[in-house]
Amino acid sequence: MVRCCQVFLWVLSLSVGDWVEPFSVLVDRVGRLGLFHWNRRPLRVKVLSTMLYYSGLSYRVVAKVLRGEAEFSHDAVRLWFRRLREAFPRRAFRRRRVIVVDETKLKLKGEQLYVWAAVA
């Protein structure tokens, strides 16, 4: 986990790179959507904390990693993630039909039988 935090701190320290342009576009889009009415924390911190959580860090680790940027709790990260998650369209859910088949070999009175069971 320490290595993961070091990588994210390094990413935060970058000022140029390929990720800066998409990140600023994302921050602009979230700002235009007007998701956050109370802006006591910078919008880029909210978006970045959401991205860090989505990448696999816990709420508490995200709050610790970004402590230098702004002071906030792990519960604030949870609320920001919930709000941003609802802002972007989800992929259409495709229902797949699954049929599970099980084959069992039985021996009754010296004779081998095969029993097939299918569950839909």
Image: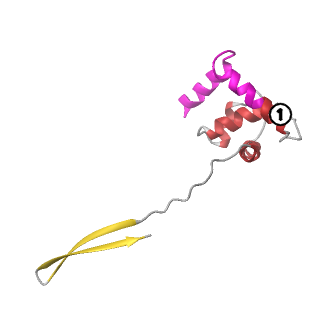
- Number of on-image labels: 1
Give yes or no for residue 91 being in the magenta stretch. no
Q: Is residue 91 above or below residue 11?
A: below
- Quarter of the rendering occupied by the N terminus: top right
Q: Quadrant of residue 49 in the image?
A: top right
Q: Depth check: 83 or 67 in front? A: 83
Q: Is residue 13 left or right of residue 2?
A: right
Name which quarter of the figure residue 76 lies in.
Answer: top right
Magenta residues span 1-27
Left or right of 97? Residue 83 is right
Magenta stretch contains residue 4: yes
* Residue in view at x 56 percent, y 31 percent: 4
The one nearer the camera, 44 or 71, is 44
Residue 10 visible in the picture: yes
Q: Secondary structure at mark 1?
A: helix
Q: Amino acid at mark 1?
A: Gly
Eyeballing the image, is 114 above or below 95? below
For the point 63% across and 40% down, the residue is 54
Report the predominant secondary structure element of the magenta stretch: helix
Q: Residue furthest bottom?
A: 109
- Measured as percent of width and height from the top left, residue 16 is found at 67, 15
Residue underneath mark 1: 31
Residue furthest left in the image: 110
Say whether residue 71 is visible.
no
Residue drawn at point x = 57 percent, y = 55 percent = 94
x, y (%) of residue 41? 83, 33
Task: Please state the horizontal and vertical placement of residue 37, each as a whole percent of the image.
Answer: 89, 41
Nearest the camera: 28 or 41? 28
* Residue 105 coordinates in the image, percent (x, y): 21, 72
Residue drawn at 71 percent across, 30 percent down: 66
Q: Is residue 88 above or below residue 100?
A: above
